[in-house]
Image (tube, helix red, strand yellow):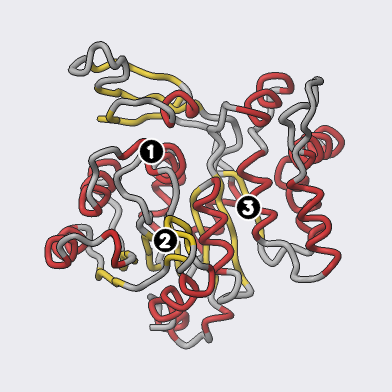
Amino acid sequence: MPPAAQLLPTHQRKIVALGGGHGLFASLSALRLLTDHLTAVVTVADDGGSSGRLRDDFHVLPPGDLRMALAALCDDSEWGHTWRDVLQHRFAGSGELQGHSLGNLMIVSIWELLGDTVGGLELVGRLLGARGRVLPMASEPLEIVAEIRGHDPDRPDETVVVHGQHRVASSPGVVSSIGIVPTCPQPCVEALDAVLEADWVVLGPGSWFTSVMPHLLVPDLADALVATTARRLLILNLEVATDETRDFRAEDHLASFAANAPGLRLDAVVADPSVVDDPETLRAAAAEVGAELVIAPVVARARPGVHDPLRLAAALRDVIAN
C-alpha cells in the first residue's frame, strides 16, 4: 500500500468491492461498517428472472445485482430501511408483473428518464441514503460463455459450450473455462477510476464463475486491477464445492483465479476455518498468487453458509488496518 494510504484511518480508506448477487451483498454489508468511501463494481451478465426479462425487453443492463448492491448500502434509518424494502419488493400473482422486483422496474424507469446509467444509480442511491456508490463493471450487458463437462447428464465425459449466466449457474456439469461476449465490452469509466484510485480492492465472495471471475475477463477492468496501487483481497466462499464449483477445494479457487488472471496478484485471502481442509496447502496456494492467507471465523453462527456481517467486518478490519 502507498505510504500515504497507510497513514489513513480505516474509515477514510477508499475500498472497491467487486462481485454480484448475494455474495456482493455480504461483502458490502461488512465493508460499509469499516469505511466512508465504499464503491461496488457489479457484474452485468444476469440473464434470468426479472433482470433477464427487462434486459431483453428494454435493451438495458440487467438491474437485479445493481439493485441488491444498493439495498446493501442503504442508510440505517427508518427512511433508508423503508426504501430498501420497497426496492426489494417482488410481485407475486400470475400477471405480467409476476416475479418482477419493484426496484428493477424503478431503476429501468429512471434510466429511461435520465438516459444515464451511472446517474440513475446515483439517484436511487440518494433516495436510499446509500453509504457508498454502485457502478456496473461494464457499460453494456454481457453474456457468460462457458465450456462445461457433463452438462448433459447422459454424456458425462462430453464438453459443450453453454451460453448465458443462468444456464451456466444451473448446469449439473463442471465448468472448465469461462468467457464473456462481447470479449472487449465498453468499459464503465467511473468503475475504472474507482479501482485506480482505491486503497483496497475486494473480490468475492459469490458465485465463482458467474459473479466473481467475469470482472477479470473485462479487459479494461482487468488492466485497471493490475495497474492500481491498491492492495487486493479475495474472500473465499463459505461453500467452496457447490453448483458452479462442484468438486472444488478452497485451493482450487486460487488456481482458477491464477488461470483467469495470470498477471494479477493478490495481497490477502480470507477464508473461514470451515473451508480449510489443509491450512498449509491453502497457504501455499495463496502464496502462489502473492497473498497472505488469513483464516478467520466469518460464518453466521446460526446460519451455515451465510456470512455474518459483524464477523466478516472484524476479519476484514484486521487485514485492511495493516
Most extreme residue toward the top is 154
Q: Earlier in the sequence, mark 1 or mark 2?
A: 1
What residue does disc 1 label?
209
10 Å crowding of disc 3: few (<14), some (14-19), many (20+): many
Q: Disc 1 to disc 2, how far (Cα)?
A: 23 Å
Residue 304, disc: none
Q: Earlier in the sequence, mark 3 or mark 2?
A: 3
Q: Disc 3 to disc 1, how far (Cα)?
A: 19 Å
Q: Earlier in the sequence, mark 3 or mark 1?
A: 3
* For residue 7, above or below residue 107: below
What residue does disc 2 label?
228
Instruction: Please identify the quarter of the rendering in which residue 272 is found.
Output: bottom left
Instruction: Please identify the quarter of the rendering in which residue 56 is found.
Output: top right
What is the three-letter code of the residue carrying label 3? Ala
Mark 3–mark 1 CB contact (< 8 Å) = no
Q: Position of residue 206 (x, y in %)?
A: 44, 49
Q: Nearer the viewer, residue 78 or 234?
A: 78
Residue ID at (25%, 66%): 291
What residue does disc 3 label?
69
Q: Nearer the viewer, residue 255 or 242?
A: 242
Q: Position of residue 193 (x, y in %)?
A: 55, 56
What is the three-letter code of the residue carrying label 2? Thr
